[in-house]
Amino acid sequence: MVALSAPVLERLLGAGAVGRPGARLCRASDLASHSGERAAMPTAVAALDRLLPGGLPKGGLIELSGRRSSGRFSLGLAALAAATSAGQPAALVDLGDHLDPQAAEQAGVDLRRLLWARPQRVKQALAAAEMLIAAGFPLVVADLGLSPRTRFLPDAVWVRLARAAQAQGAALLLSTPWRAGGIAADAVVSAAQTRPVWRGGGRTPRLLDGLQSRLTLEKWGRVTPHRSQPVSLSLDGLEGDDAGALLGTPAGRDRMLRSA
Amino acid sequence: MRVACVLVPLFPLAARLRSEPDLKGEALVVVEGNGNAARVLAASRKARLSGIEAGMTLPQARALLPKLIARARDREGERAAQETLLEAADGFSPRVEDGGEGLAYLDIEGIPGLVAPGGSLTLPLSPGGKESDRQSERRLGGDLIGAVEKSGLPARAGIASSKLAARVAANLADSPRVVPPGEEAAFLAPLPLARLAPEIEIAATLERWGIRSVGDFAKLPPGEVESRLGELGRQFHAVARGLDPRPLQPRLPALSLSEGMELEWPLVTLEPFLFVGNAALERLSRRLEAQGLACRRLELVLKLDPDGCDARAIALPAPTLEVKTLLTLVRLELEARPPGAPVTGFVFAAHPDKPRRAQLSLFGPPALSPDRLATTIARLASLLGADRVSSPRAVDGHRPERFASAAYEPPVPPTVAPLPRAGRGLLAVRVLRPPVELGVTVAPSGTRPLSIRSSEGASPEIAGSVRIAAGPWSMEEGWWSDAPAARDYWDVELSEGGLYRIYRDRSRNLWFADGVYD
């Protein structure tokens, strides 16, 4: 089999024959974007993929808002895991330096494909996100931490980010404790009604099992559908020796209790 | 052995015009020295037509032509031009000698028969006698001149069986000039002695003897010449007879390529520097490209006014040839750490590496452009700090805050896009780095926390009464080290919301929150 690069194909078929919509030859992986529906990147979280048809829309700014312990950091990691496990590069803009690489690896993130930027201010975080989109990353997760001061940022900032994502066909997942993206977001999902799930009680030692939350699609394009889906996040997703490596897992703690 | 000599006439002038091509066609002189003592080293054709010659002082030259443009000798530009000349010669022979300013010798034994018109290698031609050999050599000389001129330098070439004869042939008009094998003495004989550039004392003696041409000198008996003119005369006599025992001394290939310039006046702002730096980087990129290489690390040495020096290195995440990328990195580097004084000269040195090619796949996920990625990482490093842009790595151990990082070099994407792995629905912990110190009220009957409150001004702020607490889980690590960890961990849910991972440091009896379940 002979491998032909895009420049060679263009020489053979003529300029403009490769890559663009309507061209005579397209990449197979781009075909979906030329159909009627908007292409999406699955997150492998069933509730989120149902709310946003197929996953995070490519070329869009998706805002995920929720208070502390609402599960939005876990959802961001799930999106990164889905993208990197499919062989795609992805970037995490981590305001507040919150990533635990061990936990990310257990969640399925291919760390070699993940670029980790650790800004210290909100403006730095947004500038970094824009640079990463422009570099061609198909998925950029911008986590604005627990309590960012975003009130002084003008709407133009978010519009600019949304335009950058649209121009590059990238999905930008903006994870914030409260709504910040204003009118620029293509989709807004909020995580609320969070309830921790405990195991045991009484004479049995208590163990944190996970948490349940409810995702609500507050905005999709120009409509406000207000559809919602429950989502369960569990600490019990690990198996075998992996479990002992994480302190926050029941399996790891069972092992500790047994060895004590 | 057949030797080709390639020569750049008026080398200081040619090197200056290579750096400043806008001056071509102007009345230009390159001078050495300061003020009124500056002397003309080389003059352009327009200046020479006005009577300006090498050796004149600058005021003398200006008296002849008031609008004369004068430039100081640019040693850095000359060194880069010499490297360019040698690299062009490398394209024709594996054995190239650096002959000094504007001069290169090539061992071309057996090569002319392999070169087709245009310079491409082909199968050996059928034997066609001496005349066809001479034509092949002439063609090779023409291609050699073309290659050097393509890199921005004028050139002449001569081909002979000795270095000296080749150099003399290169100096003559009607370039390229080929001296057939064995005819070196006959070729040199009619030429004036000045062509051999004899020492001044010997030249004066020979003048008194009435010897004008190389042939006249060659006819003298060697023993008599040696007894009267000494060792220098013996060597010079051998040269006149076409004997040149000096072997060709091939140079080793350069480990780094460099381009630079000495500026006419000190630069104090960034934009003018980037303007001249852009041209130097373009030349550097072309030279790298000619050798099938790319820049992996760029070193910049700035000469500062009056006699300072500022050296810095820019490491690239991926080898690149893109001038725009390199210029952006230089801009960011200089913006982050401006030099402390006006810049009077600069040198860019590129450490070469094999370029990384991004092969597109029809069915696989898209790959990042190495050049764009390199630029982006450099810009992020400039914005956030070099240690804050990386690829995370897992580390063995038990402390939850542990992590390692590595340079971001994503593996090649698969040729066919795999399906994403099924989601595990895993609840993750936001690690708090550094941990937030807490004031904790514990139950009188034990260590169970009842309420927690972060210290004033801590970020994030944590406060509330504990609704459910689970623990403790003991963790002990590094007792043998200077920084041991002995902690009792608890998971706590606050009445006001929020699920935290907190611990008591047993050695100090202090409480901290080091994670938020989120």
Image: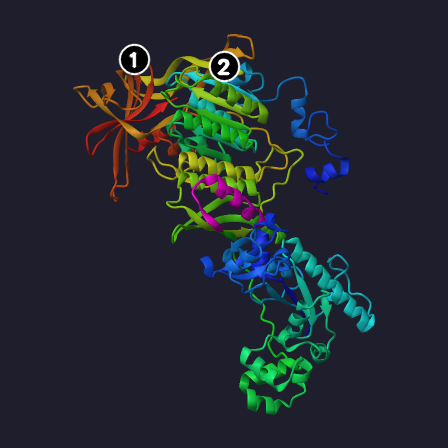
Answer with left or right where residue B416 lies relative to residue A252.
Answer: right
**Residue assigned mark 2:** A188
What kind of residue is marked 1?
Ser
Q: Are marks 2 and 1 on the same chain?
A: no
Q: Residues within 10 Å of mark 2 (few under 14, many from 20)?
A: many
- Identify the image quadrant of the N terminus of chain B: bottom right
Q: Nearer the viewer, residue B428 or B269?
A: B269
Q: Which residues are magenta?
A: B263-283
Disc 2 on helix, strand or loop? Answer: strand
**Do the numbered discs 2 and 1 sit on residues whose CB atoms are within 8 Å?**
no
In front of the other: A2 or B359? B359
- Residue A177 picture quarter: top left
Task: Identify which residue is drawn at 57% across, 89% down.
Answer: B226
Q: Position of residue A253 (x, y in %)?
A: 34, 28
User: Label for residue B495?
Assistant: 1
Q: Is residue B189 above or below residue B447?
A: below
In the current view of this chain or complex, which residue is farthest to the left? B444
In the image, residue A61 above or below residue B100: above
Q: Is residue A98 above or below residue B205?
A: above
Pick the front one: B430 or B329: B329
Residue A135 place in picture, x, y as percent: 54, 33
Q: Quadrant of residue B83?
A: bottom right
Res A146 visible: yes
